[in-house]
Amino acid sequence: MNKLKIILNGIITENPTFVLLLGMCPTLGTTSSAINGMSMGLATMFVLMCSNVVISLIKDFIPDKVRIPSFVVIIAAFVTVLQLCMQAYLPDLYKSLGLFIPLIVVNCIILGRAEAFASKNNPFDSLLDGVGIGLGFTLALTLLGGVRELLGTGKLFNHTIYPEEFGALAFILAPGAFIALGFLIAIVNYFKNR
Amino acid sequence: MVIVLTIITASVGAILGYVYKITAAPIAQAGAKAQEEAIRQVAPHFDNNPIAESDTIKTDNGNIVIYPASLQGNPTGAAVKAHSRNGFNGEIEIIVGLEQDGTIRDYRVLSHAETPGLGAKMEQWFRTDKNKQSIIGKNPGHTDMTVTKDGGDIDAITASTITSRAFLEAVRTAYTAYTQGNIDGISGTTATTSQQHNQHTATNEEVSK
């Protein structure tokens, strides 16, 4: 039961996008379509799971003073692995997300979870935390991407829902990202606080 | 403290080196495949190896690469990779397929950072046969490859004139590079190609005898 709580914590209670408001740069930048948002979320989730487990495993060996540099090196390593693998085996996806993959290194969700959770808990719980927060991030990005894609182009996951001419282009552009995110946060918090 | 940090960075370095080694070949393969695919899509039918015979022209504005296409030794045209740095969001890189006389056969946008839903429409826009949108089948030698707003013959993408200007600039660059390359070729290499051609017919005659 406790384990389930860790996962649900990441998805609902401490949802990184809607509640903690962490990692706003990739959130706003990559969500021009639902599929882009989802891919970015999954990529972040992969890095988060790996870095959480490794940091939790070696937390006792790392002196406090060099804690942050060590975490950053480990996170950067996983991001680079992800980037190389994506470039090699999923070149199309890499092309559309390319710019944002290296930015996962400085995504504060990952360093935040390393600092707040993985460095205090055992590896298995840290893995679950990575899954939970990662899923929360993925769901939030997919939702935001979906809303923007639907309102902007009339499509959802590339399936046409209504003709493109009626779409409000602003939602694909940066201002629409802020507007859509603001409304989503308001809606989510309304239901959460009821 | 120093030791721990050294151990961590060293082991991370080793892991990354290993992953790089594994993925280097597939990455190069994926890149080469994408390039060959693009050439095959835009260039006239060919049976040579355009990548091996490619010709890079260095300009102040970066490199233009010409991939000559030929069928049984006779040049049929080329695919030309060119770009423009005047896009709405930086560089636009395209590959244009040209017939022997410079007529545009097809094009692909290789990389760009234009606005989705606006400038990013260029992949479809300039091949859609509607009003004066399409550039396919037109020859930049006869058609004025600038947007109608600037007195040219091509309709710009609605609300994306800057992108359209940059795109057409890249097309013109490609055309100029290709035709100039051809003119340079006439003085030097045409003699040898015609010789080869003669030899070819000679052997053919011998065979028919």
Image (cartoon, grey):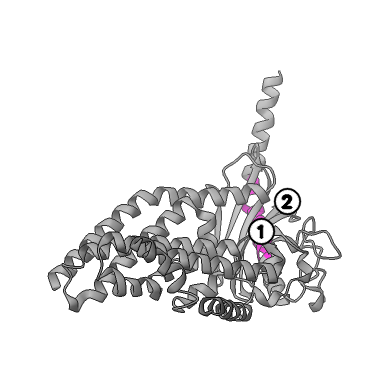
Host chain of mark 2: B
Question: Camera-side residue: A26 or B164?
Answer: A26
Question: Camera-side residue: A15 or B164?
Answer: A15
Q: Position of residue A150 (x, y in %)?
A: 68, 67
Residue farthest along the right direction in this orientation: B131
Per the image, label 2 sits on a secondary structure element best described as: strand
**Residue shown at 39% from the left, 73% from the top:** A109
Question: Camera-side residue: B202 or A28?
Answer: A28
Question: Camera-side residue: A122 or A108?
Answer: A122
Host chain of mark 1: A
Check chain identity for marks 2 and 1: say if they share one. Answer: no
Q: Position of residue B133 (x, y in %)?
A: 80, 65
**Residue shown at 60% from the left, 75% from the top:** B89
Compared across the picture, whether B76 is left or right of B129 comes to left
Q: Position of residue A172 (x, y in %)?
A: 65, 73
- One can see residue A44 in this view: no
Q: Position of residue B163 (x, y in %)?
A: 68, 73
Magenta span: B171-191
Q: Which kind of residue does numbered mark 1 sit on?
A: Asn
Assess disc 2: are there few (<14), some (14-19) or many (≥20) residues with their C-alpha within 10 Å of its C-alpha: many
Residue A193 on the magenta span: no
Q: Which mark is residue B99?
A: 2
Residue on which disc 1 sits: A158
Per the image, label 1 sits on a secondary structure element best described as: loop
- One can see residue A189 in this view: yes
Task: Report the Cα–Cα distance between label 2 and label 1.
Answer: 34 Å
